[in-house]
Image: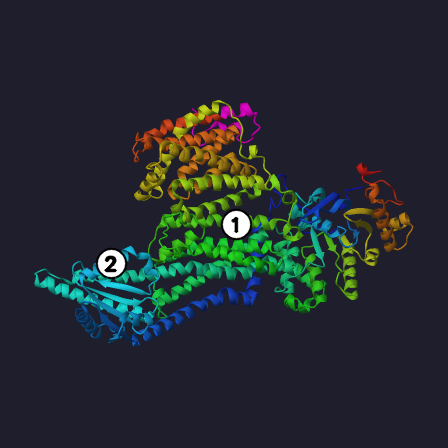
Amino acid sequence: MTSSRDIVRVQDLRKSFFDESRGEVKAVDGVTFSCHSGEVFGLLGANGAGKTTTLRVLSTVLRPTGGSASVMGHDVLAQPEAVRRSLGFYSASTALYPRLTGRETLEFFARINRYPAEKVSVRVEALVDRFGIQEYADARVEKLSTGMKQKLSIARTIAHDPPVLVFDEPTVGLDVLNALEMVKVIRELRAEGKTILYSSHIMSEVEKLCDRIGIIHRGRLLALGTLSALREATGQHYLEDIFVQYVTRTEGLEGAGIGPLGELEGPPTAGGRPEEAP
Amino acid sequence: MKEGDHGGGRVRGPGTRSDGGSRPRNDGVLATLFRYEMKMLLRDKRTILIAVVAPLVLLPAYILIMNFVESREQRALEEKVYQYAVTGTLGEWAREVVDAALTLEAEAADTTRPPAIFELLRPEAPEEALRRGELHLVVQGLTPAEWDSIQEAEDSAAPLSDQDPEEEEGVSSPSLPAIRILFRAESDFSREARGRLAERIIEVRAARRDSVYQSAGFPVTMESVAPVEAVSVASLAREAGAFLGIVLTPLLVLLMLSGGSIVAVDAISGEKERGTLETLLTTAASRTDIVNAKLLSVIVVGLAVAVFNVANLLVYLVLGILNLPASLAVDLGPLELLALLLLLVPVAVLVAAALLLLSGVAKSYKEFQVYFFPLFLAFMVPSVAASLPGVGLRSVVVLVPLSGVAVGVKEILMGKMDLPFLALAFLSTGAVAVWLVRLTQRALSNEKLISGADLDAADLAGGPSLFPRHVFRWFLFLWVILFLASLWLGETLGLRGQLVLNLVGIFFGGSWVMIRRYRLDPVAAFNLRVPHPSAWIAVVVGAPSALILGIGLAQLVNTHVFPIPEEILRSFAQGITGTEFPLWQVVLFLCIMPGIFEELAFRGVLLHGLRQRIRSPWLLALAVGGIFGLFHISLFRLVPTAFLGFVFAWSVLLTGSVLPAILWHALNNALSVVPVHLGLLSEDFTPEGWWALPAGLGLALAMWILWRAGPSRTGGSQGRGSPDDGRSDPRGKPRP
């Protein structure tokens, strides 16, 4: 299932939280997938499905409870800094420092991500040009509009020119135009050869953007494949219907102890992970 | 794909540590983080204003207000006309003395204050009038007999005098008539009147005595008067130093806390709330660098507050820009100043680490505010230690973080530079600061910071897996209880009571609470195992040897590190050995009980908890010994008891059993107490220097036997001390 093309590898990943009232909560419960070089990989799931937890483990903010994950061959536990250096993380909840200017923000993030010091100023100017933020690059972030902040945030994410980009529900809270702008930028980044992990619960975005899609529900990966493979497997055309079909099927089967499904190559197979195959 | 120059493909060498073993330009990242942290801080005008500028304005404002209030009060007191009445059997004589005194007052050469004006009244019942506030003073002329009977009555009814609004001032010598001044202590005017009049009456008396002396042919020189004045001036400066010394540390801690909290709350709680923390945590900067940068910026603010305010004070002191009120007039040399600032460094670090830890634990600004008050109290309470009467640096207070510094600051300001003890105060606060910094680094490197889940598996499961994490806290808690108990109950309980409280209540009770709370197996936690029989032989050989070495060590420390006042040593020796208890009580309270309960607590539960945190058996034994030493709440017993604790800890590590340590401890105490109690040895008995050689050999032999006894029986299951560790004895001497 994995190959040398795999930039991101996630193997039987588990993450539990502990809660005084609920006890152990398995946010991610044995997820396996990998992202190939230069593709956009979509994680599709409802709120609380485990998308953000998976991506946070990948960006080393959280430590996995079990299983493993690596980015560019760096293990998240053994080499967290190397992982973070090859990764740009963007989410709707990540914010900018209000008291820094745009230029300072870009310089700061380039530097702490260990972009070569002598090239930082050139890189900052290139980003300012690319995102067309010259006019307000020296204004404090607190004075910027939502759209301006969004552009700066994306520029911040790629300040150190990482090969892997993680977008965790990036369009949450954005209006239609800004959301479209976001999708456009992600397309451009793919065209530049970045490997992109994209999580969302918005079907249309995932349909438009992603080369392969993983459907995640209650911490488990239900299906994995290209959109056409998923269509073939379910006989549904719209991603929304595909998603609903998988989720309802799992809900029904959960009691029968049937584990998650493996990656779909053409028609659906029952070949899950070997030890859990029925 | 753009690998480019981001360095993502850089091959890492094997064996690099997890979070940044090979760190190219690591300093660059820390520097960048710190630079931006400070940049953002300086752009926050409110922070600068409240944290740094406001306190600077505070001091001159305080001085101006103090000056204003003092001068106004002074003027009010001076402009007052004081009413007084004269009574008593020798009223006529008293009136004559008072007249002479008031003449002196009226003709005083002192130009700094105008003479006070006194008015003589003749009310019906002068004492009643004084009570009602119609008079300021009542002057009584008393015969010697009356004076003596009053003195006796006062001695027998001393507690009652508290309820009496009147204070008395007698001027008398045996078998001479006396003057007694009654006044109301709660009235400023009455006190001032008393002070003025008493001062002049004493002058009158001195003048009359001198004339008597002179007429009798005794020479009366100025020198006999001059020293009195010199002393009073010096004591004024010392008093000012004392006042400032009491106030300075709490004031600075207060300012550091308030200034630092604004920065600290923004540094983590604020970042959390804004969502910038997650951004920061997904960058290549290591957690340690992030925490350190934030820590540095809070420390910088704390130190800036301290330096600015001390410098500020100095400007007024040295340049004399403002007329200082008497309470602030202190002399400070450059050395004193340097020592003062150095002492404040660990305080700033401690405050910074605590604030940052709090900011990390709090999930929002609001939560930070909720937690801030207890933290504030926890810092302010020890920092007011210098205001306790009679607390000197040469006491156990030097070991209490913040309190040691507070007392040190006070002594410096009073002109006393006790360098070894100032260093000790620096170290005691510094050690806690370093510990808290590391705790903060660890806590903030934890993912709980972002995940919102407060607990992990160990927290949820509770029990034994959680105990190693909490064992330090528990013993810190026990130490505080022990310290407070020794302060408050030491006198009332007596030696036996205190021993029972400490040993059974605090040590055993605390241990038992820990065992119950963490569901520990008592046998494992207390290290209750039957050792190899040869261990008992080792104990019999080791006990006298370790005792002699411990005494020798104490002497070395006493002569070379810090001398201990002779009277403390003697009073301790008498407290322990000169007891009037029967022998069986001496053996029970001083030998058997300490042996059992101290060993169960320190070489049992403490060792059990720490051994899962400290891998090296040497460090483990040192930690157990050091903590044991600190629990003796006495500076001069710290080193020998820590040494014994270290040896006992090794005996447990080698045999896996606490039982030899119990016997050893009891035997040790018996050897040091029983011979003296029986009169076989004198209290002052000290071993000769050469005794160290056989004692060292004896201890080495004991350790060797223990090492031989341990693994052969338990099959190495107790797992600490590898054969190499056991091959040499803990004092590093070669095996005989």
Of residues B428 and B271, the one drawn nearer to the viewer in this rendering: B428
Q: Which residue is mark 2?
A: B151
Mark 2 nearby-residue class (10 Å; few <14, some 14–19, many ≥20) = few
Residue pushed farthest right? A235
**Mark 2 secondary-structure assignment:** helix
- With B36 as the anchor, is B176 left or right in this view? left
Q: Which residue is mark 1?
A: B436
**Mark 1 secondary-structure assignment:** helix
Q: Is residue A121 visible?
A: no
Q: Is residue B597 visible?
A: yes
Residue at 27% in and 64% down = B168
First to last magenta residue range: B707-736
Q: Chain of mark 1?
A: B
State the image coordinates of residue B5 (x, y, percent, origin top left).
Answer: 67, 51
Amino acid under label 1?
A: Leu
Magenta region includes residue B721 = yes
Magenta region includes residue B531 = no
Q: Chain of mark 2?
A: B
- With B473 as the anchor, is B580 left or right in this view? left
State the image coordinates of residue B551 (x, y, percent, origin top left).
Answer: 36, 35
